[in-house]
Amino acid sequence: CPKTQQKLQNLTLTPNYVLRSLIMQWCEEKGIEPPSRSKSDGSSHEVGGNRLAIEALVRNLSSSSLDERKSAAAEIRSLAKKSTDNRILLAESSAIPALVKLLSSKDQKTQEHAVTALLNLSIYDQNKELIVVAGAIVPIIQVLRTGSMEARENAAAAIFSLSLIDDNKIMIGSTPGAIEALVELLHSGSSRGKKDAATALFNLCIYQANKVRAVRAGILVPLMRMLQDSSRSGAIDEALTILSVLVSHNECKIAISKAHAIPFLIDLLRSGQARNKENAASILLALCKKDAENLACIGRLGAQIPLTELARTGTDRAKRKATSLLEHLSKLQVL
């Protein structure tokens, strides 16, 4: 290695798929024959006839026949789900730009296959960059807003997958309508749609500016409802996880207080699962730090008894949070 001077364990070169995709797109725009590639050894992901079959499928994505486009998108969706090799071969065959074009299809099933294929392709990290470079973010958000429920679910999952790269968190969050569409799915989607939206929103809100965007987009309305939703497995967990990220921003902290979250959080201290109690205590502590009004509020609502019990029997983290809150309450009473 020229940097560390250590002997390399593996001499296989990693192709730059992003650059190759840009070159292929440029060649197509200019009407130039793309450069052929040579293979130096057997270490590449060549899978014999599969490459030819995949290239034929990719060509069918641009067919004049709707049925051929739909069938090719469905087959690519399935292939991309099966293996990393397929994900690499499909990317090398320029499937991604063709699938991005199909996101705007008026046929909902074609649109659904295309967005799900991109989701499956994004599992391979290098494809995440290719998908963004191909201009997928805006049309994925459009699918999230107007597609079938399954397409919206998979669009949300695709946004989560792409947002695992930090730069993409910024890009997605600043795209008009992105966070609003996820909040709407969290509010009115299917059970799976709500879960996918919650996961995507949590990941996006790790970036500070997206926290404010989410609150301004109305995320607290569905979150407050989820805190009381025992009918859907994981709803309370999801709400608490997102709130625990939002509460670190001062504007969001004020909004959470105004949304009357404190009574719900105290109820969870009394009757929630161990993990819920821990997260509720953590959020309450963040709400009450340097905020005498919130601290007085939890005192009036009888938080001392469940906090005392949590300080005695909770997880290590829960004990620390509960003890800290009790100390703050004690100082307030002395004052």
Image: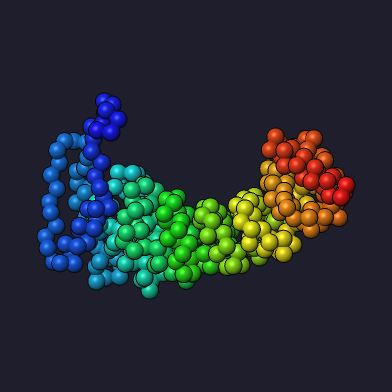
Q: Nearer the viewer, residue 166 or 108?
A: 166
Quarter occupied by the N terminus: top left
Q: Position of residue 313 (x, y in %)?
A: 78, 35
Q: Is residue 318 above or below residue 149?
A: above
Image position of 95 (left or right of 110): left
Give 73 or 319, whichever is nearer the viewer: 319
Rendering quarter of residue 29: bottom left
Quarter of the view holding residue 112:
bottom left
Residue in the image at 29% along x and 65% along y: 69
Identify the residue at image location x=33%, y=67%.
Answer: 102
Check the image and tell me how it is coloured. Answer: rainbow
- 174, 96: nearer the viewer: 174
Residue 109, position as x, y percentages in the image:
40, 66
> What's the residue at 46%, 69% (across, down)?
176
**Front-most of residues 294 and 309:** 294
Residue 273 visible? The answer is no
Q: Locate residue 1 relative to residue 112 in the image: left or right.
A: left
Q: Is residue 236 visible?
A: yes
Q: Residue furthest bottom?
A: 106
| Residue 227 position within the rendered picture, expressed as x and y whole percent measured from the top left | 70, 56
